[in-house]
Image: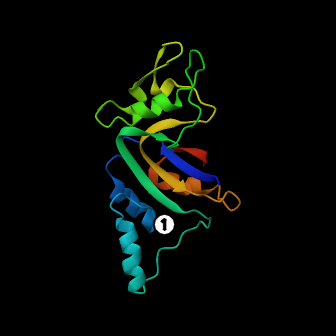
Amino acid sequence: MSEVSKYFVPKDDTRLFGKEHEIAERFWAIGVFVTTPDRFIDERIKEWASAGRSLPTSAHDFSFAEMGLATSPLHDPVPNLIYDLACPQCGASLSQVANEIWEDEESALALPLREIACPDCHAISKSNALVSPEAYTFSRAYLWISDVDLEDWDSNFIHTVESVLGPCMEYTSLET
């Protein structure tokens, strides 16, 4: 079974890094509930429900599993799973090699700047220079939505996201 995920990457992600609570509060005010690593919005929803309080209303109604904010000082790959990465010199598959290098938690080097060595032609490429049929990027802060139902997806949701995060690029990923 496949899962469609949406990602909204701000064009200026540096101003958002480390501001998860502030961003989540701004989304809360417009009826968009995003999870953060400490899940404080989830706790608020439970508190409000047990107190009988009405939650803020959203202008959007579409199906999804979960929505959250992600931040990383080293830049996460977006989409989080990038398939079919290839060497820009010879076209050899580099997905496995790249993912191994990106998962190195001891490196303080940002992911887009990490070098990937092609085992076929021995070319050295920065991560952000790898070729993929799927659009991808790296980001320090972004909004993700998992298991989106494209049949009822609201294409105007990007305007709501941009009202909080500023101008964004939207990425869609089919994860199998």
Q: Which residue is mark 1?
A: 30
Using the image as rendered, state which of residue 113 and residue 141 is in the foreground: 113
Give the amino acid type for the residue marked by disc 1 in the picture: Ile
Using the image as rendered, state which of residue 104 and residue 148 is in the foreground: 104
What kind of element bears circle 1?
loop
Residue at image coords 44%, 67%: 29
Q: Is residue 12 in sight in this rendering?
A: no
Q: Is residue 48 in sight in this rendering?
A: yes
Determine crowd level at label 1: few under 14, some 14-19, many 20+ residues with C-alpha closer than 10 A.
some
Left or right: where does residue 153 sit relative to residue 38? right
Residue at image coords 42%, 30%: 112
The picture places residue 93, in percent across and down from the top left corner, at 57, 26
Rendered image coloring scheme: rainbow
Q: Is residue 36 above or below residue 16?
A: below
> Quarter holding the N terminus?
bottom right
Q: Is residue 21 above or below residue 9?
A: below
How many dots with numbers?
A: 1
The picture places residue 150, in percent across and down from the top left corner, at 68, 56
Left or right: where does residue 5 sit relative to residue 114? right
The picture places residue 173, in percent across and down from the top left corner, at 60, 46
